[in-house]
Image (spheres, grey):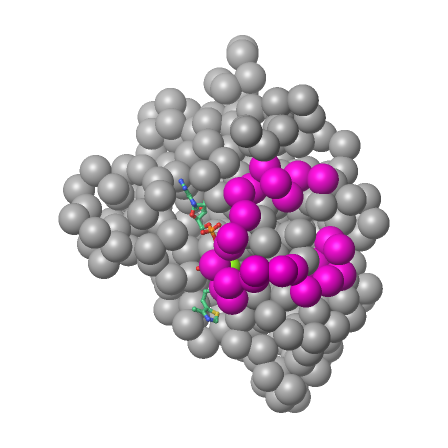
Amino acid sequence: MGEPEMWGRRSWELLSTVRERSPLVQCITNLVSMDLMANVLLAGGASPAMVHSLPEINDFTPHTDALLINIGTLSEAWLPSMMAAAAAAARSGRPWVLDPVAVSASDFRLNACLQLLLLRPAVIRGNASEIIGISNASRVQGSKGADSSHESVEAIDAAKSLALSTGAVVAVTGAVDLVTDGKQVMAVTNGVPMLQKITATGCAVTALIAAFVAVTPQRALQATACALAVFGLAGEIGMATSRGPASLRMNLIDSLHGMDEEAVTSGVNIQHRASADLSPQP
Ligand SMILES: Nc1ncnc2c1ncn2[C@@H]1O[C@H](COP(=O)(O)OP(=O)(O)OP(=O)(O)O)[C@@H](O)[C@H]1O
Ligand SMILES: Cc1ncsc1CCO
Ligand SMILES: [Mg+2]
């Protein structure tokens, strides 16, 4: 079996396992993303729970299969819940995934992310500007809030060094999604540019990564690449019948829900990449 076929099969196995086991994914996420994120998790076969109040964390988080923390609309009131949930997940051996939305926008966000990193996320997924910002622990010049001002390939060195310093798998999304543990790099080329015109698609795919990692926590690199490919493929299939972002938002959810073995095994596009192939094009 060649590499593309192997990844197609692995993606189908993982999507099928998520559908069979329906992992419970606790999401402490921004107010913009909640609806799309919960619907993407349901369409992927997982069970979403948007639980973020501090008094509930110690009862709830130890019984989940994975936790997602997204700082998109971070406030002083929510940060203690995020810290408590990440700590509870770590104590109970549950994987947790960090989405450092607009990490470079303020010192408050940057410091919150740096504190969260100490609680050992299994995966960190961001756009290129976010991964450069969190990796360098700095406020990136020209940062545009929640949208990226860099290409994913520009963030590969930052992604590798973040992976090595934290022990997390790091995913950088964009035209090509790159996934690394600091040594290997996987490139996922599924997706359509229109996904950038729907708010919170990045947030939603991070939650789908949490669902995939929940069913194979020892293989977070594979699970992350497969979740990104399946989500991007749902975008490709959905785009064929869409007129713009609003219809793609609906068709993306329908395509993910209806995705079958043939679509996954023939449509997933994941490859190992050598560092030399990742230099930004002049
Ligand atoms: N140019 C592109 N071509 C194809 N797919 C893309 C492109 N840009 C982004 N995507 C896909 O869109 C999805 C969201 O990624 P993106 O990098 O836009 O996240 P984000 O900036 O964190 O989004 P948000 O903050 O709105 O949630 C991913 O599945 C990614 O692969
Ligand atoms: C638009 C926006 N603002 C804060 S979070 C968010 C959703 C995309 O990250
Ligand atoms: Mg984002």
Is any part of residue 239 visible from this angle? yes
Percent coordinates x, y for residue 36 in the rendering: 37, 63
Image quadrant assignment for residue 250: bottom left
Taking the spot 42% from the left edge, 61% from the top edge, the residue there is 200
Is 111 left or right of 264, judged from the image as shown?
Answer: right
Q: In which quarter of the image is the N terminus?
A: top right
Taking the spot 74% from the left edge, 72% from the top edge, the residue there is 111
Query: Residue 142: within the magenta?
Result: yes
Q: How many dots with numbers?
A: 0
Percent coordinates x, y for residue 157 in the rendering: 72, 40
Taking the spot 43% from the left edge, 29% from the top edge, the residue there is 268
Percent coordinates x, y for residue 280 in the rendering: 58, 32
Nearer to me, 70 or 222 = 70
Is any part of residue 219 visible from this angle? no
Start and end of the magenta stretch? 134-157
Residue placed furthest toward the top: 1
Percent coordinates x, y for residue 184 in the rendering: 71, 30
Nearer to me, 170 or 141 = 141
Q: Is residue 204 above or below residue 282?
A: below
- Look at the magenta stretch and give its main secondary structure: loop
Q: Quadrant of the C terminus?
A: top right
Query: Residue 1: within the magenta?
Result: no
Taking the spot 83% from the left edge, 49% from the top edge, the residue there is 165
